[in-house]
Image: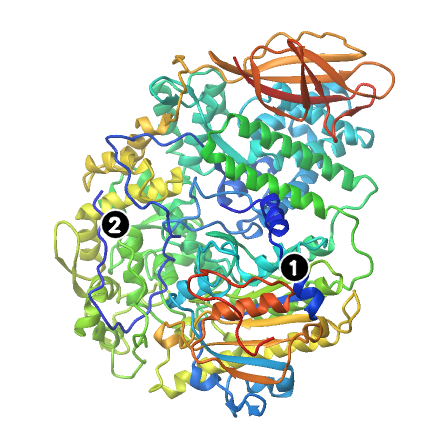
C-alpha cells in the first residue's frame, strides 16, 4: 500500500540525511525526469571518443544533441542487475530494485526525492505523460512508484494539467476556496465514518483516499500570480496517435511553466511506455514503436526506421533543454537549466534482445554547479542503482543505497 | 478451474507479443481453499472508471464525463476492476473533484429534477438533498448525511437554490458514499454477513448493467424485499433483458476500447467504421445473452448486429432499416465472436493482420492461458515482409524452430485460423496474392488437440473446450465482481458454476447462477461473538429525535447501527440561540468509545463531553454540526 504523507514525513524526519550534503556542496534545486521507451540499438546510440573528447556520429541517435554536447553527461553501459525485459526494466529503472525496502522504500527516484525534499510547493511532484494510459496502469505502463507496488499515474491530458497546476478554468469568487475546503472536510469526515464500519483490510484504501484529500486541500491556495500558462488548443484529443507530437510539445511547455511558477521541485515527463504501440506517423512510419524496436541488424532499413524514431525523441529532449535555458528559475540562481538536474532515462539496453544491460542514460542541467558537464562515461556494467544514488546526492540527499541495499551500495564514480 | 501454465521450454524465441501486462507480483499466489474459505470477504468497492462515468452521467442526465478524463486503474488479471486494488490516489481525487464540480454546476442549472422545486426554502433544500442523495448514494439519505449536506447548502444559500444545490451536488459526487459501494452486510452468524437490500441492489445493477439501480430495483430495496431469493432472481432476469450486455464487459474482456485510437493505414477504416464495430460487439454480446444463447452460440452464431455502413464494409447483406439490426451471414467465413470486426482490427497491426497478437488474445482472454513474455537475450526480430510469402509463411518459423515452439505453437495457429480476415476485419480470399492456409491444432485444451481449418472450426473447438467456458465465467467475475488473484474466494463461486456449465448452457443461466450463489449475497468476516440477526437488520435505525436544548444547543442523537456488543451513534448539534458559539455537549454514553469522528471527546463521569474540531467548532446561529462515535458495551 501507499505510504501516507504522515509516514513519509516521519521518514524524512527520521533519516538524518538531507542537511549534510547541502551544507558541504552545491545541489540541484529541481529534478526533471524524461523517459522514452523501448530501449535502443546501442551501436547506433553510442558516442565515440573519450570522457571529455567525444562526438555523436552521423546518423546516430544522439546526433541531434550535437550542439548541446558540452552540456551533457552521457552515461553508457549501466546494468539493471536482476531485472530484464520490458516490464522488469520499466519497474527497476527508477526504483533500483522493484518492490524493495531499504533506504528508498520502494519509491522511484522522482517520488523519493520529492518525499525527501518535502518542499512547501503546491505540488510535491508532478507527473506528466504522453499517451501512457490506453492499456491501464501496470508495471508495463508506469515508471513512478510511491512505495512497493504503488504506481503513480501521470496525467496525459495537457488541458487537465493546465487546470490542475495553473487553475485555468477554475471558478473564481471570493468564497470558492472556502467552499471547496468545506467539501473536502466533509468528505474526510465521511471517510472516517466509513472506516469505522469497514473491515480492517479496507482501512489502507480509505486512509490513502483521505491522505489524497489532505494533499488536495494543501493545494487549495489562491492561484499563482503571473506565470505564463501555455494556451491549450480546444478539441485536442490527447489519446489519438497522431496527436502524440503536439501533446508532447504542450506537456514540455507545461513542465517548464510549472517550474517557472515554482509549482513543484520534481517533475517527470513520460513519453508512452515500454512495448509502446505508438506509430510515428509524423515520421511517415507505419509500424508501432515496439515493432520498430525489434529490427534485427540484418534488416538495415528496418533499423534505420527505428533510429529515425529514436532521433525524434532526441530532438524533443534538445527542445526541452533549450526551453529550460531560456526560462529563469523563479527562486533565482539563473535559468532553470542552471538550477535543475535533468535525467533522460531508458528501461532497456538493446531492445532486440529484451535485456537491461548496456542501458544508456543522459544527464543535463547545471544542478547549481553540482554536475560537471560535457562528459561521456562508460561505466562498464556498474549497477544503475549507483546512478540513482548519485542523482540523489546531486539533489542534496545522502542516501547510500537505492533499491535493494544488498545488491549495490554507494554512488557511481565520476558522476557528481 | 483448470488453469494451464505455459511452460517455457525455450531458449530462443523470435516473436514479441504485445501481451497484456503480467499481473503485479502478489504476496500470496496460493489459490484459496474453497472447502475452508468459500465466501468473499466484506469489502468496499470503489466504482470502476466505466461505472463512475455511467453513474455520473445518469445523475447529470447528459454525457458530461468520459473514461479518459480519469486516471487509469491498476490492471490485475487483465482488468481494471479489481475490488481489492481500486482506490483513490491524488490524481484521481483531483480529477473526481473537477468532475464533481462540473456535474454539480450542470445539476444546479436545472435543480428541479431532484426534489421538484427551485426555491431556497428549508423544504426545497431537504427535498433536493434527499432526492439527489438517494440517487447518488444508492440508498436513502440518513440523518447524519442530511445534516451534513444542509450545512453545505447553507454555505451558498444566499446565492439562491440553484447555486446551493450545485454545491451540494458537487459535495455528493465527490463523497465516499458515491465513490464506494459497500459490501459489508450485517452479521448472519458463523462468520457470515448478509448484504443489505441496498447493497444487493447496487451489486446486482452494476454487475448486470454497469450502472446504478433503476427505480424498480430501488423500490424493491426500499421495501426490504431484495434479499429474498425469488425477488433477486426476478430482478436479475428483468435486468438481463435490458440490452446492457453486462455493462461493457465485452469491451474490457477483448480490449476493444483500444480500437478508437489505434492507427490503421487503410483510409476506408474511418472513425465511423471503428465506432460501428464497437457498437456491433456490444450489441452482439447483449443479443446472445438476452436470446438465451450459450457459449457455443457466442462463438459460432452466423449473424451480426450491424448497420448499413458496417454491413457494406463486411460485404454482407444490408439490414432493412437504418439502425443496427440482426443480419444473418449467408455467405463467407464470418462466425461469432472471433470474427467481430472490432476484435480482428484491435488485435491486428496498423498495416496487416497479426497471427501472434490474435493468437495471444484468444489464449489470454478466451482460454485464460496468458502467454509469458519472451525470455531475455534472444533474437526477438519479427520476420520481414516479403513479396511471394503469406503472413503465415513469415511466422511459421516460430513453430518450426524447436526453441520457440513451446510458446508459439500455442499462439500462432489460433491466429492463422483468422488469416481470411485482414488487419481491418475485412474478409479476403488471398493473402499477398497467395492462397491462405488456415489449418491448425488447438493445443493444451480439453478435449485435446482439436484440429481446425479457419475461423469456424476454431470457434467450434473453443466452444467445446472446458477451458473456454470456465474462462468465460472467470472473466465475467473479474470484470463484474472485481475478482482478482488466485486467492480470491470468488474463484470458488466461479468453479462451482463453471463445473455445471456445458457448451450449450444459456449464458443467461450462467449469469443467474452467479447471482444465486451464496457468494453473491453473503460475505465472510469475523463476527466477534455477534449473534446472528435474521432477517438482515436495517443498517439505519432512526430513533425519534430527542431535542434537548443545552446552552442554546439543540442535540439530535440517532443510532446509526447497533449490535449486541456495540453501537454507533450520529449526533447533530444545532445552535438555536442568537449568537455564534463554540459548541460542546455532554451526553450519556453506554460502554467505551472506540471510534469518533468530527469531534474531540473527554470522559466526564458517566458522561462524555463532546466538542468540535477545527472546522466545525464555531456555530453561527441556526447552523449545525454533525459528529458521531462508536462504542463497545
Q: Residue at x 63, y 21 (%)?
A: B628
Is A335 situated above or below A137? below
Task: Relative to A47, say whether B64 is above or below.
Answer: above
Q: Residue furthest right?
A: B579
Label 1: chain letter: A
Of the pair B8 and B238, the residue shown nearer to us: B8
Q: Residue at x 39, y 61 (%)?
A: B346
Q: The N terminus of chain B is located in which quarter?
A: top left
Mark 1 to mark 2 CA distance (whole Å): 62 Å
Q: What colour scheme has been applied to the protein in the rendered image?
A: rainbow
Q: Is residue B505 left or right of residue A410?
A: left
Q: Is residue B57 visible?
A: no
> Residue at image x 68%, y 39%?
B106
Callout 2: few (<14), some (14-19), or many (20+) C-alpha neighbours within 10 Å?
many
Mark 1 on the same chain as mark 2? no
- The numbered disc on residue A18 is 1
Q: Position of residue A183 (x, y in %)?
A: 69, 35
Viewer-nearest residue: A312 or B13:
B13
Does B374 sit left or right of B251 as displayed? left
Residue B579 can be seen, yes or no: yes
Quarter of the image for residue B146 reads top right
Q: Quadrant of residue B139?
A: top right
For the residues bearing labels 1 and 2, Cβ distance under 8 angstroms:
no
Chain identifier of the residue bearing label 2 in the image: B
Q: Is residue B423 above or below residue A147?
A: below
A65 horizontally vs A106: left or right:
right
Label 2 SS: helix
Find disc 2 in the rendering and name its residue: B299
Amino acid at each position: 500500500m501507499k505510504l501516507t504523507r504522515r509516514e513519509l514525513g516521519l521518514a524524512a524526519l527520521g533519516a538524518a540525511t538531507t542537511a549534510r550534503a547541502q551544507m558541504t556542496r552545491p545541489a540541484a534545486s529541481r529534478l526533471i525526469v524524461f523517459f522514452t521507451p523501448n530501449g535502443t540499438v546501442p551501436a547506433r546510440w553510442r558516442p565515440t571518443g573519450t570522457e571529455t573528447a567525444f562526438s555523436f556520429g552521423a546518423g546516430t541517435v544522439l546526433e541531434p544533441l550535437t550542439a548541446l554536447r558540452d552540456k551533457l553527461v552521457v552515461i553508457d553501459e549501466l546494468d539493471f542487475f536482476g531485472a530484464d525485459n520490458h516490464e522488469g526494466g520499466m519497474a527497476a529503472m527508477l526504483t533500483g530494485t522493484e518492490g524493495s525496502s531499504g533506504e528508498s522504500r520502494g519509491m522511484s527516484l522522482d517520488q523519493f526525492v520529492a518525499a525527501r525534499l518535502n518542499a512547501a510547493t503546491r505540488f510535491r511532484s508532478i507527473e506528466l505523460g504522453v499517451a501512457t494510459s490506453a492499456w491501464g496502469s501496470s508495471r508495463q505502463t508506469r515508471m513512478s512508484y510511491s512505495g512497493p507496488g504503488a504506481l503513480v499515474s501521470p496525467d496525459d491530458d495537457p488541458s487537465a494539467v493546465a487546470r490542475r497546476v495553473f487553475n485555468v478554468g477554475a471558478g473564481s469568487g471570493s468564497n470558492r476556496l472556502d467552499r471547496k475546503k468545506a467539501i473536502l472536510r466533509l468528505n474526510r469526515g465521511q471517510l472516517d465514518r466509513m472506516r469505522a464500519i469497514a473491515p480492517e483490510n479496507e482501512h489502507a484504501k480509505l486512509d490513502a483516499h483521505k491522505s489524497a484529500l489532505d494533499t488536495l486541500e494543501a493545494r487549495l491556495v489562491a492561484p499563482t500570480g503571473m506565470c505564463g500558462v501555455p494556451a491549450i488548443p480546444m478539441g485536442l484529443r490527447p489519446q489519438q496517435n497522431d496527436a502524440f507530437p503536439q501533446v508532447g510539445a504542450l506537456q514540455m511547455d507545461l513542465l517548464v511553466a510549472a517550474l517557472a511558477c515554482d509549482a513543484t521541485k520534481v517533475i517527470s515527463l513520460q513519453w508512452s511506455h515500454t512495448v509502446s504501440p505508438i506509430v510515428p506517423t509524423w515520421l511517415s512510419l507505419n509500424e508501432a514503436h515496439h515493432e520498430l524496436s525489434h529490427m534485427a541488424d540484418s534488416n538495415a532499413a528496418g533499423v534505420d526506421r527505428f533510429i529515425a524514431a529514436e532521433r525524434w525523441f532526441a530532438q524533443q529532449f534538445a527542445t526541452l533543454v533549450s526551453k529550460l535555458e531560456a526560462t529563469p528559475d523563479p527562486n533565482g540562481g539563473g535559468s532553470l537549466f542552471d538550477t535543475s538536474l535533468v535525467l533522460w532515462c531508458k528501461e532497456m539496453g538493446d531492445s532486440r534482445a529484451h535485456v537491461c544491460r548496456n542501458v544508456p542514460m543522459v544527464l543535463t542541467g547545471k544542478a547549481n554547479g553540482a554536475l560537471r558537464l560535457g562528459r561521456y562515461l562508460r561505466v562498464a556494467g556498474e549497477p544503475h542503482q549507483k546512478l540513482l544514488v548519485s542523482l540523489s546526492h546531486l539533489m542534496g540527499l545522502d542516501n547510500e543505497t537505492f533499491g535493494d541495499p544488498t545488491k549495490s551500495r554507494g554512488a557511481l564514480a565520476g558522476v557528481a | 478451474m483448470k488453469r494451464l501454465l505455459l511452460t517455457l521450454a525455450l531458449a530462443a524465441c523470435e516473436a514479441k507479443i504485445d501481451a497484456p501486462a503480467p499481473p503485479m507480483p502478489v504476496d500470496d499466489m496460493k489459490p484459496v481453499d474453497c472447502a475452508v474459505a468459500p465466501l468473499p470477504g466484506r469489502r468496499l468497492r470503489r466504482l470502476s472508471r466505466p461505472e463512475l462515468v455511467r453513474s455520473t452521467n445518469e445523475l447529470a442526465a447528459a454525457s458530461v464525463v468520459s473514461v479518459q478524463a480519469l486516471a487509469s486503474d491498476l490492471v490485475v488479471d487483465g482488468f481494471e476492476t479489481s475490488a481489492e486494488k481500486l482506490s483513490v490516489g491524488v490524481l484521481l481525487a483531483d480529477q473526481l473533484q473537477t468532475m464533481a464540480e462540473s456535474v454539480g454546476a450542470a445539476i444546479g442549472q436545472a435543480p428541479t429534477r431532484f426534489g421538484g422545486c427551485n426555491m431556497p426554502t428549508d423544504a426545497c433544500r431537504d427535498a433536493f438533498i434527499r432526492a439527489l442523495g438517494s440517487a447518488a448514494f444508492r440508498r436513502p439519505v440518513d440523518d447524519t448525511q442530511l445534516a451534513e449536506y444542509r450545512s453545505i447548502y447553507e454555505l451558498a444559500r444566499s446565492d439562491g437554490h440553484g447555486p446551493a444545490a450545485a454545491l451540494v451536488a458537487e459535495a455528493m459526487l465527490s463523497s465516499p458514499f458515491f465513490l464506494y459501494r459497500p459490501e459489508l452486510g450485517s452479521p448472519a452468524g458463523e462468520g457470515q454477513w448478509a448484504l443489505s437490500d441496498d447493497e444487493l441492489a447496487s451489486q446486482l445493477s452494476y454487475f448486470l448493467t454497469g450502472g446504478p439501480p433503476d427505480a424498480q430495483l430501488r423500490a424493491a430495496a426500499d421495501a426490504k424485499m431484495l434479499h429474498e431469493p425469488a425477488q433477486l432472481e426476478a430482478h436479475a432476469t428483468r435486468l438481463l433483458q435490458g440490452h446492457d450486455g453486462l455493462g461493457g464487459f465485452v469491451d474490457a474482456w477483448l480490449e476493444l476500447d483500444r480500437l478508437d485510437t489505434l492507427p490503421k493505414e487503410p483510409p476506408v477504416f474511418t472513425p465511423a467504421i471503428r465506432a460501428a464495430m464497437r457498437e456491433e460487439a456490444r450489441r452482439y454480446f447483449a443479443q446472445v445473452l438476452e436470446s438465451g444463447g450459450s457459449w457455443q452460440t457466442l462463438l459460432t452464431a452466423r449473424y451480426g448486429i450491424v448497420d448499413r455502413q458496417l454491413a457494406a464494409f463486411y460485404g454482407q447483406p444490408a439490414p432493412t432499416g437504418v439502425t443496427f439490426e440482426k443480419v444473418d451471414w449467408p455467405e463467407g467465413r464470418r462466425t461469432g465472436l472471433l470474427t467481430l470486426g472490432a476484435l480482428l482490427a484491435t488485435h491486428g497491426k496498423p498495416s496487416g493482420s497479426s497471427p501472434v497478437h490474435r493468437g495471444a488474445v484468444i489464449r489470454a482472454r478466451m482460454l485464460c492461458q496468458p502467454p509469458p513474455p519472451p525470455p531475455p537475450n534472444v533474437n526477438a526480430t519479427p520476420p520481414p515482409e516479403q513479396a511471394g510469402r503469406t503472413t503465415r509463411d513469415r511466422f511459421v518459423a516460430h513453430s518450426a524452430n524447436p526453441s520457440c515452439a513451446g510458446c508459439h505453437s500455442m499462439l500462432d495457429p489460433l491466429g492463422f485460423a483468422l488469416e481470411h480476415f485482414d488487419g481491418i476485419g475485412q474478409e479476403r480470399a488471398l493473402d499477398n496474392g497467395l492462397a491462405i492456409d488456415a489449418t491448425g491444432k488447438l493445443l493444451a485444451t480439453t478435449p485435446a488437440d482439436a484440429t481446425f481449418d479457419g475461423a469456424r472450426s476454431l470457434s467450434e473447438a473453443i466452444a467445446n473446450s472446458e477451458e473456454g467456458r470456465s474462462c468465460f465465467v472467470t472473466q465475467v467475475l473479474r470484470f463484474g465482481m472485481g475478482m482478482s488473484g488466485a486467492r480470491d474466494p470468488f474463484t470458488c463461486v466461479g468453479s462451482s458454476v463453471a463445473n455445471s456449465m456445458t457448451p450449450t448452457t444459456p449464458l443467461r443461466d450462467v449469469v443467474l447462477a452467479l447471482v444465486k450463489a451464496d457468494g453473491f449475497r453473503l460475505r465472510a468476516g469475523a463476527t466477534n461473538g455477534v449473534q446472528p440477526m435474521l432477517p438482515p437488520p436495517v443498517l439505519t435505525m432512526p430513533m425519534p429525535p430527542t431535542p434537548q436544548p443545552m446552552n442554546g444547543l439543540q442535540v439530535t442523537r440517532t443510532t446509526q447501527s447497533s449490535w449486541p456488543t456495540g453501537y454507533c451513534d450520529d449526533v447533530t448539534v444545532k445552535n438555536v440561540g442568537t449568537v455564534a458559539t463554540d459548541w460542546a455537549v455532554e451526553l450519556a454514553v453506554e460502554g467505551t468509545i472506540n471510534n469518533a469522528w468530527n469531534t474531540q471527546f473527554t470522559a466526564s463521569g458517566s458522561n462524555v463531553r463532546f466538542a468540535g474540531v477545527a472546522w466545525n467548532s464555531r456555530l453561527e446561529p441556526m447552523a449545525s454540526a454533525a459528529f458521531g462515535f462508536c462504542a463497545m458495551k
